[in-house]
Amino acid sequence: MHELPLLINISIALIVAFIGGTIARKIGLPTIVGYLLAGIIIGPFTPGFKGDIDTIRQLAELGVIFLMFGVGLHFSFQDLWRVRDIAVPGALIQIGLATLLAYALSQIWGWSISSGIMLGLSVSVASTVVLLRGLMDNSLLNTSHGQAAVGWLVMEDIFSVLILVLLPALAANGAAFNWQNLGFTLLKASAFVAIMFFAGVRLFPWLLNIIAHTRSRELFILAILTITLGTAMGASELFGVSLALGAFVAGAIISQSHLSHQVGADIFAFREAFSVLFFVSVGMLVNPIFLWNNIGHVLAITALIVVGKAVIVILLGLFFPRPARTFLIIAVGLAQIGEFSFIIGQAGLSLNLLTADQYSLILAGSLVSITINPLMYNLLPWLEKALRHLPGFWKRMDASTPIIEVKEEDLQDHVVIVGYGRIGKHLVDVLESLHIPLLVIESDVERIDLLNQRKIPTLYGDAANSEVVTHAHLEKARAIISTVPEDSSAATIVTAAGDINPNLTIIARAASLEGVKTLNGLGATHIVQPELEGGLELVHHTLLSLGFPLREVHSYADAVRRDNYDIDAITGEEHRSLHNLLSAFEGIEITWVTLRPESPIAGKTLAEANIRSRTGASVVAFIRNGQLTANPKSMTVFEADDRIGIIGEQDQIDAARELVEGPPEPMLGPDEVMGTE
């Protein structure tokens, strides 16, 4: 039997991570917690299977590369620019103060200067994954408060990348600081970034576009991997900068391509898989016995992350003209540390700026803070109430007008629209014009801005991959409409909506015939497949143009929809509808005639007009002032401008039309036309 240590380690790591992540998600915690605990379980400090930490660590390097590539791919200067007044100075001040506090704490413990600085840098930056998930799950990302938190996080990402660039130079200098060496490092990093944004911005999109035209998804994915790993390795080997910076720059360049969304979708599986191994490798470094013996240190670091950083952000609210709630949300969202802290800590560990035990304390603080963070959002009302008891402090902090939020009392008998694309926008326009209360769930920030400008209630988040749909108050809604084009996402939304309110009208868009059947099985009330619906509309208009009655044409179209657009075979219901079409077409016409004031039956009742006895045609309906009345009673009095619906054979309808319309208007003579006698 062959020994396969690499395969065994990967398999065990992924299996344990899967179990840990599933349990964490089930109890409402971020999956990162489960991955870290999985690493501890298979680490060298716990009984049972002991993973090869060196093997998994090498694979974890790929996790770092793909994580940083993803950060670059979704990096947005636009998000940062939108809230630059608060995010740029606020993030830098918060990082500086948090680093100083952590450094002071480390000196009390007798750590070296370099170790203290590394501790400070590690605890000063928050986790992108945890922050975004927390804001989305609490319906805060669509607000100006959430956008400010995202901009703050973008600034922290920039700072983290800069730290990763400078760390090797700072570590090499040792006690004797060498500005020349530091300048040379910055020069090499700047040269790399300049070359990549000058040449790479032309080369990478051009290459991806060529590969895309081969229509080979395998080659496209291979090209992405080549660009990502090649750029990271080139940055390290040729310019002496970190792999992380190379991957980040590659992602930032590709984000400018029109293929960036496809790149993100194709690289997603690689990023997630190797990121899991990265978090597992981080957990393997944690020594539970050491942490238990130093529980005071663990609690102190956790308090610094959870309480210290939050207090710093709240105090910064005194100096920025923003609502107090903005800083409360930022304080809660940033009261944790995650992937960037791990990367910075690992860099410090590899450069001998941190010991393994010191790094374990950072990891313990991360684990506890990530676990606590989702619960902290529940403290927002209490925290706001407590600060209001300090009138002077609150007045100084709340230095701006309130931001309009989605109010629960306004969501009653509303319609929820998932997606504000072309279809969603049309739905919003129609429902708004009809004064129907509505709520839009959207995951694109720019579209959220447009909705906020229109003062339309919105929730920011991915309805198919978040708890955001639970905040839409579906139990009080009239209907939910899913406009998302992916069948899997639509299925998740339909399932969640049905679980929340089994009696809710659910209208969903499907991308394929299989999707139509799936959504129907999940309980969607109405399903629309745009391509098949287009074909059905062609049939619809063709039958109408051939003279078939409108009602029967509608009946046939509805029968096709009820049969889930099954165009391969005509079902029994469709056969009946087609038969009705033929029967209606043979010898019977329905005609609408408008009464002129001089009509002989104007002012008479239906009985007095005696249309059926005189012509053989029957009056089946009439329209007056936009109101339709079917089967009018014999005492109904006809008025001028009424539209009367008549059925019968063609000669009967002709006779009835002549009776109803009255004699033709007399032709005017030339003198009358000119207005002369």
Image (spheres, rainbow, N blue to C red):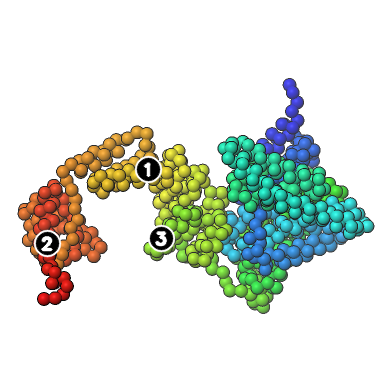
Q: Please give left or right for residue 141 compared with residue 38 in the image.
A: left
Tag count in the figure? 3
Q: Please give left or right for residue 562 compared with residue 474 in the image.
A: left
- Label 2 residue SS: loop
- Residue 447 in percent (x, y) is at 53, 59
Question: What is the distance, in whole Å, between disc 2 and disc 3 at their CAs?
Answer: 44 Å
Q: Earlier in the sequence, mark 3 or mark 1?
A: 3
Tell me if label 2 and label 3 are in contact, CB under 8 Å: no
Kind of residue indicated by mark 2:
Pro
Residue, disc 2: 664
Residue displayed at 79% across by 41% down: 45
Residue, disc 3: 431
Q: Looking at this view, is 466 or 606 the one in front?
A: 606
Kind of residue indicated by mark 3:
Leu
Tell me if label 2 and label 1 are in contact, CB under 8 Å: no
Q: Image quadrant for the N terminus?
A: top right
Label ID, residue 535? 1
Residue displayed at 18% across by 60% down: 594
Residue displayed at 46% across by 62% down: 411
Q: Which residue lies furthest to the top in this view?
A: 1
Q: Looking at this view, is 408 or 144 the one in front?
A: 144
Kind of residue indicated by mark 1:
Gly
Q: Earlier in the sequence, mark 2 or mark 1?
A: 1
- Label 3 residue SS: helix
Question: What is the distance, in whole Å, between disc 3 and disc 1 at their CAs?
Answer: 26 Å
Corner quadrant of residue 595: bottom left
Q: Looking at this view, is 186 or 609 the one in front?
A: 186
Corner quadrant of residue 40: top right
Looking at the image, is mark 2 or mark 3 nearer the viewer? Answer: 2
